[in-house]
Amino acid sequence: MSVTIKDVAYIAELARLRFTEPEQEKMTRELNMILHYVEKLNQVDTEGVEPLSSIHDQSNVLREDVERPSISNSEALKNAPDRQDRFFKVPKVIG
């Protein structure tokens, strides 16, 4: 598959880009070079190669989910600069 100047113009229109004629020609050459490179990758023998979900073979190490007591409401609010009843009071950030 190769890219034509008409393809580049169409893609540019979809992306709301404007290219001069020399830029369209350059873009066409560059996209064709990329497609040529990808075609080389299609020639690689991948028979028997398992697909990867990650390049690392490490698994995620998580700690045990153990229930622990939390601090009391009064303890959490003792250093609060401002509070209302049992809640932190913060400045309004949404208009």
Image (cartoon, rainbow, N blue to C red):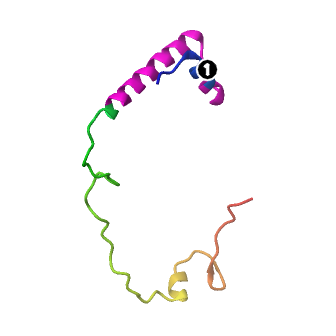
Q: Which residues are magenta?
A: 11-40
The residue furthest right is: 95
Which residue occupies the foreground of this view, 53 or 88? 53
Instruction: From this view, report whether residue 6 is shown above or below residue 15.
Output: above
Instruction: From this view, report whether residue 24 is shown above or below residue 51.
Output: above
The question of residue 39 being in magenta is answered with yes
Side of 3 where 50 appears, left or right = left
Residue at position x 40%, y 88% in the image: 68
Residue at position x 32%, y 52% in the image: 52
List x then y, in percent, for residue 26: 49, 14
Name the quadrant of the C terminus: bottom right
The residue furthest front is: 47
Local crowd size for mark 1, using a 10 Å CA cut-off: few (<14), some (14–19), many (≥20): some
Side of 42 where 6 appears, left or right = right
Tell me the element at label 1: helix
Give the residue at mark 1. 9
Side of 77 where 37 appears, left or right = left
Residue at position x 25%, y 58% in the image: 57
Picture quadrant where residue 47 is located: top left
List x then y, in percent, for residue 85: 66, 85
Instruction: From this view, report whether residue 95 is shown above or below residue 49.
Output: below
Indicate the amino acid at tag 1: Ala
Which residue occupies the foreground of this view, 54 or 93? 54
Picture quadrant where residue 84 is located: bottom right
Which secondary structure dominates the residues rendered in magenta? helix
Which residue occupies the foreground of this view, 79 or 50? 50
